[in-house]
Amino acid sequence: MSWIDAPLKRSIIIISGVFLSTVLVVNPYTLSWFDSDPPLSSTIIFLMYSTYFLSIFFAVLFLFFRNLAIQISVALITLIIFELVVSLFVNRAVDQKQFRLTQPEPYVDADYYSHEFIDESFSQPGGWIFDAETGGVKPKNFEGVWFNVENHRRRTVNVADESERRIYIFGGSAVYSSEVPDSLTIASQLAQIIPQDLSIEVINLGATSIHSTQQLGRLKSEVNLNRGDLVVFYDGVNDVLQRILYNNQRGFMHGVPDENILISTLRLFKGYSSIAHLFFDQLTEKERVFSSEHISISVENYISILHETNEYVERNGTYFFHFLQPTLFTKSVHNEYELSLISMGEPFVPVQVAQAFALAYPVIEENLAGLPFSTSLTSAFDGMEQSPYLDAFHMNHIGNRIIAESIWNRLSAHFK
């Protein structure tokens, strides 16, 4: 390196030293001490490489723009001190996983419950595949103790080995059922209720956050309907969340949700910063104005998709049944646990979500009332003393059983 002048050589040595020192401190081995579920998560890997880049950046900045580097360092130290002070006064709500690890009321008598079960429920299915054709997602294949995904479909425990007909159940995360093992999803419990002599296989086509438009897209692209098959849509929740709350008529992962960039940024960082968490709470706990026109158009779009689905299914010589999901908001009387759940706010029962459902669901029910293929299950849990709800929408095995029984009560008339 004799051809490099002394100042530059010294700079290269300093930058290399800073980088190597950072690597010695921040690496997969040292980070594994803080990651309880190796291999390291993608977030940790991203932060590790970001630290490497920043170490080089600040070393270069300090060597060639020392005053600016000092100013930035002082600003960062001030921000860190402010973050620490704010963290003393911000009540950081528990996240979904932390909450479920406390074994809340819906899991009290669940014989499958364990911390290992909760760990697997939050690690499966290892990601979701974006379907460009339908604009929705489907789960990656996964093999676990309680959760299994085969051919991008949550495993359904069917009683009969060979079946002449099939029931295809479409919906969002409530149909996928990350809250329970394979054998206790709505689809599996429905399969166990159906008399074996009817020879019907139940297939779970639930996927996180998708709504009716994406369900119809997946029906058209993945399912070959045969005469005698049945198509079931169990939905409503994601149509309200996407169409009305986020003004995203095309659905999850397709189109752009109507959320300003400030809230989106705060949502991204609120899990890591008390300052971001404080501002996010202040902005999202305020009530929003949902115009009657916006609700009317959104509900009209939703109902239109259900009509289109019914027509498509009938053209294929099969049968369509639609069920409107119940929610914590539609339960007539809340017990003490449910009232505490509502008071917890984000992420269990966000204020703006409750507001959107209070306005939209009555309109949806009114529009569905005259449709022969649709049934409202909004009162399915009225009178239950022990709550099935783990948040505003997701249920335990008991809630799934009641829904499966309600679905079969409607479908069984078709076989008489």
Image (cartoon, rainbow, N blue to C red):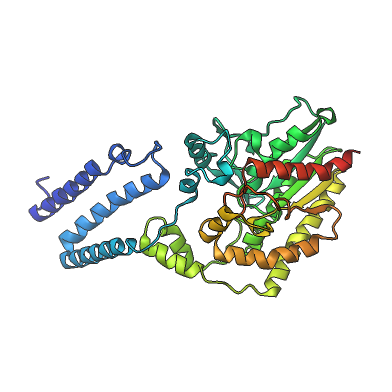
**Residue lying at 67% horizontally and 45% vertically, measured from the top left:** 399
Q: Residue at x 80, y 40 (%)?
A: 225
Q: Is residue 124 above or below residue 18?
A: above
* Residue 153 lies in quadrant: top right
User: Whole-percent x and y of residue 300?
Assistant: 75, 65
Q: Is residue 313 left or right of residue 393?
A: right
Direction right: furthest residue:
416
Please report the residue visible at 74 percent of the width from the left and 38 percent of the height from the top.
190
Q: Nearer the viewer, residue 209 or 13?
A: 209
User: Percent position (x, y) of residue 108?
Assistant: 56, 41
Query: Residue most toward the top?
Result: 161
Is residue 221 visible from the viewing direction of this image?
no
Q: Point out the image quarter for the N terminus.
A: top left
Q: Is residue 324 left or right of residue 24?
A: right
**Which percent across, then down, holds residue 140?**
57, 39
Tell me where residue 223 sits by quadrant.
top right
Q: Is residue 97 visible?
A: yes
Quarter the C terminus occupies? top right
Residue sitting at x 48%, y 66%: 263
In the image, 148: left or right of 57? right
Q: How many marks?
A: 0
